[in-house]
Amino acid sequence: MGIFQAIGKGFAESLKFLKVIALFFVFNFVIGLIMLPFASPQNANNPRVALISVGVSIIAVLVFIFLQGGALALIRDLLKKGACSMGDFMSYGAKYYIPILGLFIIVVLIALVVILLVAIVAAGIFAVANNAVTKAVIIGIVALLAIIAAVLLLFPIYAIIVDEVGPVAAIKRGISASLKAFWKTLAFLLILFLATFGIAFAIGTAAMSIAGVLPLKVGQVITIFVNSILQSYLSVVMMIALMVFYLALGTSRQPGKGPASIAPNQA
């Protein structure tokens, strides 16, 4: 399946997941409202506020993992079986919670190790030659590593859902899928990002323009409301497109079986 076909299917099939989108919207909107008081500039240097903000962020991540597991499993069912049921959302979220959480922890640890190594190497280079050229080289290397990591770690979560494997096996399968078509995957990721970012930027800018002429608090709530809708909808679009693309790469346990035809059932 081509890049634009996968992305197009992501947008087309997203309308069959309106209940999932609504669930993500409620989550994003509530978290946005909770975080709103902590975003005030006067709280910038308040350690207590910072601690509470970090705590809320951690809770949000833990809840999002559950929601993501449920949503991805429903998307898998629709693509591979032709039908899915919203009634399975909670059980799927619980089923895949630990594997996805384990994957998240492993990826964070890998990122921390890489960041530490890059910092050590950069410090050594700067100790010898601290100039504009070396800074540009270091920035270029860091950017290159970030792009490679984004491509290689794009599919492990989909391997967990599609292939029913643990986090370590999922990382191996995900990296294998990316390496199988690295440049195509990179192009897919870039085009998907540009498409979703373009939509979010255009609508977000319009919403901020409207909010700017309203009272501060009202404008902030409207901005959170619009951003929550965008985040929820585009997240589902991206999950569908990525699932379609992963299945099309043929790296799952049933390599000869691509995405099934989509039934008209709504989640």
Image: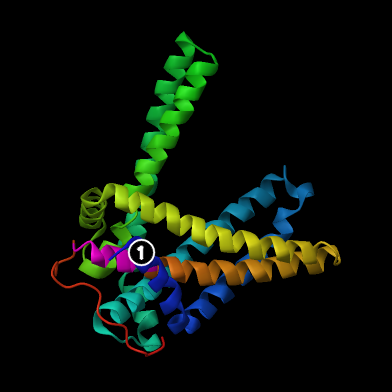
Q: Nearest the camera: 250 or 2?
A: 2
| Picture coordinates of residue 162, whole percent (x, y) | 25, 69
> Could you tell me which residue is drawn at 43 percent across and 65 percent down?
238
Answer above or below: position of 84 versus 182.
below
**Residue 106 at least partly seen:** no
Q: Is residue 187 visible?
A: yes
Secondary structure at badge 1 equals helix
Q: Residue 56: x percent and y percent? A: 58, 60
Residue at the location (61% across, 66% down)? 31
- Colouring: rainbow
The residue range painted magenta reads 241-250
Q: Quadrant of residue 112?
A: top left
Quarter of the image containing the N terminus? bottom left
Mark 1, residue position: 242
- Taking depth in this image into account, of 248 and 108 the one nearest to the observer is 248
Q: Is residue 145 left or right of residue 178?
A: right
Q: Is residue 134 above or below residue 14?
A: above
Residue found at the far top of this picture: 128
At which x and y percent is residue 164? 22, 68
Q: Residues within 10 Å of mark 1 (few under 14, many from 20)?
A: many
